[in-house]
Image (cartoon, rainbow, N blue to C red):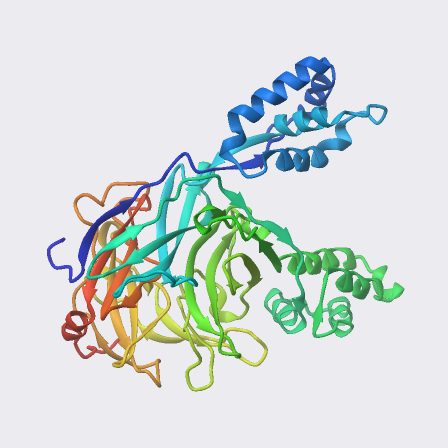
Amino acid sequence: MTTGDLATRLDLTLAPDPGRVIIKLFVPGEDALTQTRAATLVDRITLLSHDETAGMLRETLRRFGDRHHDLEATFLHHYDLVRYRVPRHLDLPPAGRLLVGAYFSHEYAVEAAALCNPSMVAHPDQSGLSPGQLRVVLSVRQIGEGHLSSIGFATALLGPGTALTVADRSGPLTVGRRQSTHHRRDLFAAGLADAGQDSEVSATVLGSLPALFDDDGFEQAVARVPADLRTRTTTHGILEELRRMTASDYAVAFPAGVPLEQRVLWPATAAESNGMEDARFVRVLREDGMPSYRATYTAYDGRRISSCMLESDDLCYFEMTPLRGPAATNKGMALFPRPVGGRRLALCRSDGETLGLTALDRHNRWGPPTPIHLPRSGWELIQVGNCGSPLETESGWLVLTHGVGPMRRYAIGALLLDLHEPQRVIAELPGTLLTPGDTEREGYVPNVVYSCGGLLHADALWLPYGASDTRIGFAHVALTTLMAAMRPPRGDG
C-alpha cells in the first residue's frame, strides 16, 4: 500500500489484451486527399478466377473464422456497403461477394493502447454462489489505435473475505447491432433548448410530434413543414441539425448467447465518432420495482464532448440518449441510484473543477448545479470530481472523489453527504483513499488513479480503478475503517 493511503490493494491486475479484436469496415485510401482506391480494388477482385476466389476466401475464413462471431455475415454486410462500386452488369456469386467483403474489412484491437476507468455493479445473475460471494459486472474503458474508446465488460466474483476473481475474457468479440428506437418528445425539446434551436421551423416540427415518435414519425413531421417555411434559406440547415439530434437516440442489441465479456459498445453516432468514454454504471430500481442499469458516459467527436446516458434491463439491449441541461455540459456526471426527496439527482462537474449536485427538472433537463465541494486540499487544487455514483450507507451517501494535484497527479478521496439533503457534506476523508503507487505511475497517461464506480459488499468498499490509463487494479477497505477516518468538513471557500 502506498504510504498514507487508506485502501489496501488486492493482488490482481487486468492488463490490456491486444488479442481482443473486432472487425471494422476498411476502405483503401479513404484517409488520403485523393480519390479512394476502392473502385480499383473491386475491379481487381472481380478479375480473379473462380478457383482463385474460392481459395482466397477459404484461406481467409480459416485464418480468421475462430476470432469472430459469424464472420461471413460481417463480410456480406461490408459487401452491401460497397456493392455500388461493383459494375452493374456483373452478377457476383456468393463466394465473390464474401471475398469483396473480406477485402473491405480489417481487425481493430479495441484495447491495444489501454484498459482503464472501470465501474462495478451487481450482476443480474446471482445464482450458484457460495456464502459471502457477490457476482459483479465490471465495465471498462477500452482504448485502441487513434485513442478511440469503447465500452467493454468483465464478470468478477467478490468474496468470501477479500477474495476477488475475474472470469476469463477470451473469445470472439461482438459489436452490438444498432437499432432504431422511439424518441421522447420532451427530451427532443430539451435538446432544442440546449442547441438554441428556437425557430419557426423547429417549433413547427416539435409541435406536430407525439409524446413518443420513431424515425418515420419524425420525417412525417418534417414533411408537414409548410412550403413557405421550406423555401427559407436557413431551413435546410435547421432540418439537418434536427435530424442529427434525432439520430443521437439509438439502441444496441446483442444476441442472448454472446457472453457479457464478449460484448462491445462501439461508437454509433457522429457525436461518438472519436469515442465513448468513462461509463459510470449504477444499478437502479424501475418504477415497477424491477432492477435495471443506467450509466452516464462521455461522447467525443474529436472536437466536442457531450454527456450521454445508456439504459439496460439485461445488459443485452441498451438504449442511448443525450443528457440535456446546464449540468450536462462537461464530463463526469454520476446518477444517484434512487430518487431523494422525490427528485432525480446526479453529481456533476459542469465548471470543469468543482464537484456539484444537480436535479432533473420537469423538462428533463439537468438544472444548474449546486457546488458541494471546491478544490481545497493540495492533492486536488486543479480540479475535483466524482469517481462514480454515490453509495448509500446508514450514515449517508458515500461519494468517491478524484482530485488533481501537482504534475497533474490524480488521487482518490471520499466525502459523506447527508442522506436526505445531499447538498450538505457531513464528513470528508482528510487524506487520500488511493494514490498512484510506484508500480502504477508509468503508463499511457502517467501518475493517474481513477475510478468510475465502486461497490459496497460484506461491509466493505470494493474499488476498481484505472492505473495511469493503462491497466486496472483493485482495492478494498472495511466500511468501518473508512467511516472512522472521516472528519467533519472544514468548510469550502
Which residue is more in the foreground, 124 or 22? 124
- Residue 274 screen position, x and y as percent: 51, 46
Q: Residue at x 61, y 67 (%)?
A: 191
- Residue 209 screen position, x and y as percent: 75, 71
- Residue 224 screen position, x and y as percent: 85, 66
36 in relation to 347, above or below? above
Q: Residue at x 62, y 51 (%)?
A: 178
Left or right side of 426 for 261: right
Left or right side of 304 for 374: left
Q: Residue at x 60, y 21 (%)?
A: 58
Quarter of the picture holding the C terminus: bottom left
491 in relation to 6, above or below? below
Residue closest to the far left: 3
Left or right side of 50 for 407: left
Which residue is more in the foreground, 5 or 255? 255
Q: Quadrant of residue 127?
A: bottom left
The answer to whether residue 179 is seen in the rendering is yes
The answer to whether residue 493 is seen in the rendering is no
- Residue 71 screen position, x and y as percent: 59, 34
Q: Quadrant of residue 204?
A: bottom right
